Image (cartoon, grey):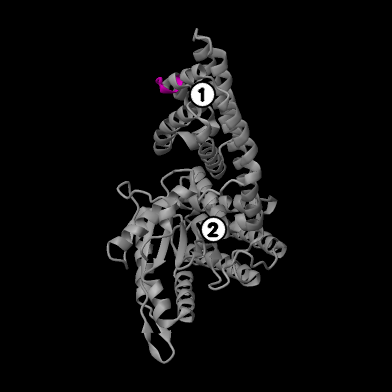
Amino acid sequence: MPTPPTIDESRPLAESWKAQLSACSDGTRQQLAAAADAPLDDYVDAFYGELLDDPRAHQFLTHDQVRTTLKPALKRWLRASLKAGPDDVDALIGANRHVGQVHARIGIPVDLVARGVRLLRQRLILRFQGDVAVDGPSALAVANHSIDIAMEAMSQAYAKAQERSSRTDAAYRLFTLVQNVGAERERQRALLLDWENRLLYAWTTHTRAYQGEPLAVSEFGLWFMHKGVPSFGQCSETDSIQRLVGEIDAMLGDAGNEEYSGLDARLQAFEQIRERLATIRHLLTMLFERLGELDSGADALTQLLNRRFLPAVLRREIELSRQSAQPFAALLIDLDHFKQINDTHGHEAGDRALQHVAAVLANSTRGSDYVFRLGGEEFVVVLVAVNEQQAMTIAEDLRRQIAGQPLTMSGKPPLSITASIGVAAHNGHPDYEHLMARADAAMYAAKQAGRNRCMLAGPDLPERPPQERDTATR
C-alpha cells in the first residue's frame, strides 16, 4: 500500500497549485477543459512511441497488461491535470505520489519518465500556440505549472521509496536468511560434497559418461542464486562462483561426447570438475566468514522471515526471471477460522498454532525457497524455479501437510488446523505488488469457496482494493 504523504512535503506543492488555479480566468479554464476533452491519442502515442524505442523500457512496456493499462491511465492523468480545480489538488497530489511509488517499486529510470513528459509538453505547446484565443498563453502556463507540480509530487515519492528500498536491500544483503550461519555454511558444503560424490559414482559405474544433474539447478545451485548472492551481495567471490558453476555445467554438457566413453577420460574430466568444486568451497567459506549473526529480519514468534525483506526478495526474483526466463510463484497462506482458535483456546494456543504451522512450512519447502510470516495468521512462500503447475502441486502438498498434522495440546484433544492458499505464478508484470494482489485474490476465492483449499490466480479473479484485503472473512 502506498505510504501517505507527509504534511511537510505535500503542503508547499498543494498551496502553490491551488494559488495558481485560483487565479485562472474563466477563459483559461475553458481552454484547458477543451484541451482535456479533445482526443488525447496523439499525446499517448508520442509518449510511449518514443519510450518503446529505448531498450531499457522494454522490460516495463512490452508486457501486454502493462501497456494496455498505462495508455488509458496516461490519458486520465493528463485530463485530470488539465481540468484540475483548487478542490482537486489534494487528491491529485496523492495520486501522483502513488504513481511515483509504483515507478520506484518497478525501477523505471527517471529520465524515461522525464523524456515522455517533455514530449507531452511539446504537444501542448503546439496545441495552445495554434489556438488564436486571447488566453492561449495563459492556458499553456497553467498547464505547464500543473504538470510541474504533478512531476514534483511523483519525484518526491520516488526518491523516498528508492531510499527506503536501498536501506532494506542493504540490510537484506547482510541478513543471512538462516538461523545459524555456521550450520548453513556446513549444510551448503555438504550439499556440494554430495553432488560431487553422486557425479563420481555415476561416472565410474556407467559405460558412457553420465551428464548428471547440472550444478546450477541442484539444491546448492538454487540456494546460491536465490539466497546466497543476495545475502552476500554481488562481489568478486560470488561472480567467481557463478562462473565456476557455469564451467562445470558446460563440462557436464560435453560429457556425452565420444571422447568421454573411456573411464580414464571421464576420471580426468572429473578431476577438473573437482578442482573447481574445491575453489567454490573455499570462496563460500570466505563469504560466510564475512557475515554476522543478525536477527532483525526474523519474526520474533515463528523465527521465519518477517515482511521486511519480502519486497527485496520479490524484486530480485522478478529481475532473475526477466534475465533468465526462469519462472517463480508466490503462495499466500491464511489459516482458517484463526479467530475462533484464539477465542476458544486462548492466545497462547493461537501463538503455538502459528509456530506449529511455521515449522510445517519450513520443513516442507526447499532450501532455495523463502517462507515469510506476513503478519497475523498469514504466511507467504516464494517458490523459486517453478512453473504454475508445479506451484499448485507444492501448494496442495503444503495444505495437506497443515491439515494432516494437528497441534498437540496438553490435556486436550489435538487441535485441527487448516489453511486457504492463493497461488500466483509470476506473469511478467514488473511490479511485485501486482503478484501479491493476485495471490491475495486467489486466497480470498479459496476462502469464499469453503476454505481448506488452494486456488490459482487467473484473469477471472479480480484484484481486491487494498483496504478490503485486511477485512476479508478469515
Residue range highlighted in magenta: 35-39
Q: Position of residue 424 (x, y in %)?
A: 39, 53
Regarding residue 105, the answer to whether it shows in the image is: yes
Q: Residue at x 59, y 45 (%)?
A: 5
Front-lying residue, 429 or 290: 429
Residue 279 falls left or right of residue 251:
right
Distance in Å between CA atoms under marks 1 and 2: 40 Å
**N-terminal of the two: label 1 or label 2?**
1
Q: Residue furthest top?
A: 132
Magenta stretch secondary structure, dominant: helix
| Residue, disc 2 | 221
Q: Position of residue 67 (x, y in %)?
A: 42, 34
Q: Residue at x 51, y 36 (%)?
A: 92
Other-residue count near label 1 (Cα within 10 Å), few / some / many at <14 / 14–19 / ≥20: some
Regarding residue 159, the answer to whether it shows in the image is: no
Front-lying residue, 446 or 238: 446
- Magenta region includes residue 408: no
Residue 50 falls left or right of residue 290:
left
Q: Amino acid at mark 1?
A: Glu
- Magenta region includes residue 36: yes
